[in-house]
Image (spheres, rainbow, N blue to C red):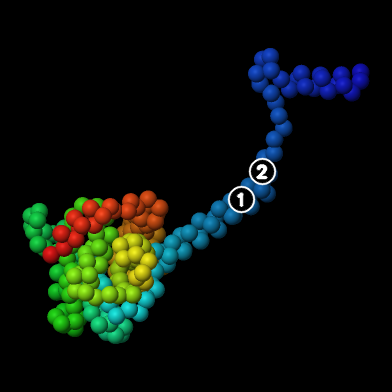
Amino acid sequence: MSRSDHGQDAEAHDRALGGLFVRRERWSLSWRGRLVVLCVVGVLAAAVVLGIHPFLAVTNPAHSDYLVVEGWIHYQRFEQAAQEFRNGHYKKLLTSGVQRDTAIKPGSKDNYADYAAEQLKDFGVTDDQEQAVPCWVTHKDRTYNTALAVKKWFENNGIKIKSIDVVSEGPHARRSRLLYQKAFGSDVHVGIIAVQDPTYDPDHWWRSSEGVREVIGETVAYLYAKFCFPFLKESSRTETAELVK
């Protein structure tokens, strides 16, 4: 039998049901290959677990004249915010925030900005050093809207700035810097200072439900803000400005 006859015979055996199915050789991982892939995946997973919290809880101040403190942070973190204000030699401390969740009824003027300004007095910040900038927008994109309220405050007071620093808490910090940058635009350098969430150990955040919930939630929220966040139209900006009292 010739080689061509052997080839035709082999090809016939590689087909079935009139050629609807064809058998082909394929490459697959050996046990060594699977072990290498498993090790690579393990290293990448460990890198993500160990690196995600420092990535989100970023501190990179712009050394501005103005410090903005997000009013929703834990009470214990106000002391650190006050220390940052004194050590950074800022001209003014602004507190930002929307209506508090503890408001007795809808529309109540119980705002995180006013709350934070009051708490900071316990740590030596005086009335002439601070300014509450409440935002009464209660729907989604609250961080972005509070940033717009702060921007509007500067505009209303005729203050032109080149930079600001924002104090946020834990893994929320990177998202705060991103959204403040979107609100203020490229002409203003937004710095960020992350104060630690006292409810879990940041170096072992995966060991507590609070840490897992916070880090995973903020990771998803940051990715949304980074890649999916819709730029508000000018009408929305005007509406937000009108809600700043």
Q: Is residue 76 visible?
A: no
- Tally of marks: 2
Q: Position of residue 189 (x, y in %)?
A: 37, 71
Give the CA separation, mark 2 to mark 1: 9 Å
Position of 188 relative to 219 (above/below): below
Front residue of 70 and 47: 70
Which residue corresponds to the image point at 19% horizontal and 81% vertical from the top-left? 129
Position of 18 relative to 163 (above/below): above
Dot 2 amino acid type = Leu
Query: Disc 2 on helix, strand or loop?
Result: loop
Which residue corresponds to the image point at 63% horizontal and 47% vertical from the top-left? 34
Q: Position of residue 167 (x, y in %)?
A: 29, 71
- The residue carrying mark 1 is 37
Q: Is residue 183 left or right of residue 241?
A: right
Q: Is residue 156 visible?
A: yes
Q: Which mark is residue 74?
A: none
Dot 1 amino acid type = Val
Q: Position of residue 174 (x, y in %)?
A: 37, 64
The residue sitting at the top extreme is: 18
- Mark 2 is surrounded, within 10 Å at the Cα level, by few (under 14), some (14 to 19) or many (20 or more) other residues, namely few
- Mark 1 is surrounded, within 10 Å at the Cα level, by few (under 14), some (14 to 19) or many (20 or more) other residues, namely few
Front residue of 29 and 148: 148
Which residue corresponds to the image point at 83% horizontal and 23% vertical from the top-left? 7
Front residue of 210 and 245: 245
Identify the image quadrant of residue 71: bottom left
Q: Are marks 2 and 1 in contact (CB under 8 Å)?
A: yes
Q: Is residue 101 left or right of residue 9?
A: left
Q: Which mark is residue 29?
A: 2
Identify the image quadrant of residue 70: bottom left
Q: Position of residue 236 (x, y in %)?
A: 23, 53
Query: Disc 1 on helix, strand or loop?
Result: helix
Quarter containing the N terminus = top right
